């Protein structure tokens, strides 16, 4: 389908809808190739690396969306196109969280309906020190109490917001609810990082060891355990 449109680029140089359409298509190709939702990627694939093809989809989407937004004028751009531009930049690590936040500021929160979009918007706010607004949005519309993934996302958001006591309480509660090794590993690992940041190195060591029992080959956990031993 894309091959049918690309020959018309020269004749559509001033048509913002053409570029926005292409940007949306390439973004969707990238999102499909992720094979994970935003929440799953953040929770279970920390420091993920995109494949070359997936990254190229997002970078191409950014190119066309930027062109379309520039032609339309940022303040006149469709909120949906601004949202996928921000997400493409996030996934591809193309720009900083500050740059992503500047794009999202042009979007009215009332536009956000999909849970994954709400969680993305809220987390970027938290990353940009807009902690209260980010957490408030998650509580209101992020479905962070309905299932384990939602509660894990809220725990992670509290950790990123440096609300360590609240995060610890929720993670400990979720230890009784988690029924897969994948979820238990995430909980133990994040508890360990919180304890470490609070200089509670023995507590961190204990939970990192629990995470390592679940996945003995995880080098990240081994590295954190080594850091705890160095603090003895």
Image (cartoon, grey):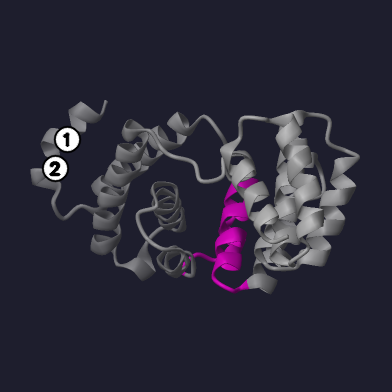
Q: Secondary structure at mark 1?
A: helix
- Which residue in the structure is indicated by mark 1? 6
Look at the image and say whether residue 122 sits in the magenta stretch: yes
Per the rendering, the mark at residue 19 is none
- Which residue in the structure is indicated by mark 2? 9
Q: From the viewer's perspective, is 9 left or right of 18?
A: left
Q: Secondary structure at mark 2?
A: loop
Question: How many circles with numbers are drawn on the protein?
Answer: 2
As displayed, is residue 70 above or below residue 171?
below
Residues rendered magenta in the picture? 106-130
Rendering coords of residue 207 (x, y %): 79, 46
As displayed, is residue 79 above or below residue 39?
below
Q: Do the CB atoms of the residues marked 1 and 2 lie less than 8 Å apart?
A: yes
Query: Label 1 crowding class (10 Å Cα cut-off): few <14, some 14-19, many 20+?
Result: few
* Residue 71 falls in image quadrant: bottom left
Query: Label 2 crowding class (10 Å Cα cut-off): few <14, some 14-19, many 20+?
Result: few
As displayed, is residue 174 above or below residue 99?
above
Residue at x 76%, y 41% (from the top left corner): 209
């Amino acid at each position: 389908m894309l091959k049918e449109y690309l020959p018309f680029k020269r004749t559509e140089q001033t048509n913002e809808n053409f570029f926005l359409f292409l940007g949306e298509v390439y973004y969707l190709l990238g999102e499909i190739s992720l094979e994970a939702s935003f929440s799953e990627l953040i929770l279970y694939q920390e420091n993920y690396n995109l494949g070359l093809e997936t990254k190229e989809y997002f970078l191409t989407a950014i190119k066309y969306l930027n062109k379309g937004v520039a032609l339309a004028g940022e303040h006149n751009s469709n909120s949906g196109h601004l949202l996928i531009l921000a997400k493409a930049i996030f996934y591809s690590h193309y720009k900083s969280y500050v740059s992503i936040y500047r794009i999202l500021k042009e979007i009215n929160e009332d536009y956000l309906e999909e849970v994954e979009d709400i969680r993305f918007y809220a987390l970027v706010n938290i990353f940009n020190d807009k902690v209260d607004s980010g957490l408030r949005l998650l509580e209101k519309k992020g479905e962070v109490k309905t299932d384990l993934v939602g509660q894990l996302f809220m725990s992670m958001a509290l950790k990123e917001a440096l609300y360590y006591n609240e995060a610890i309480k929720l993670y400990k509660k979720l230890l009784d609810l988690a029924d897969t090794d994948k979820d238990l590993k995430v909980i133990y690992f994040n508890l360990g990082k919180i304890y470490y940041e609070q200089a509670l190195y023995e507590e961190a060591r204990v939970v990192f060891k629990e995470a390592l029992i679940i996945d003995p080959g995880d080098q990240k956990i081994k590295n954190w355990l080594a850091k705890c031993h160095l603090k003895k």
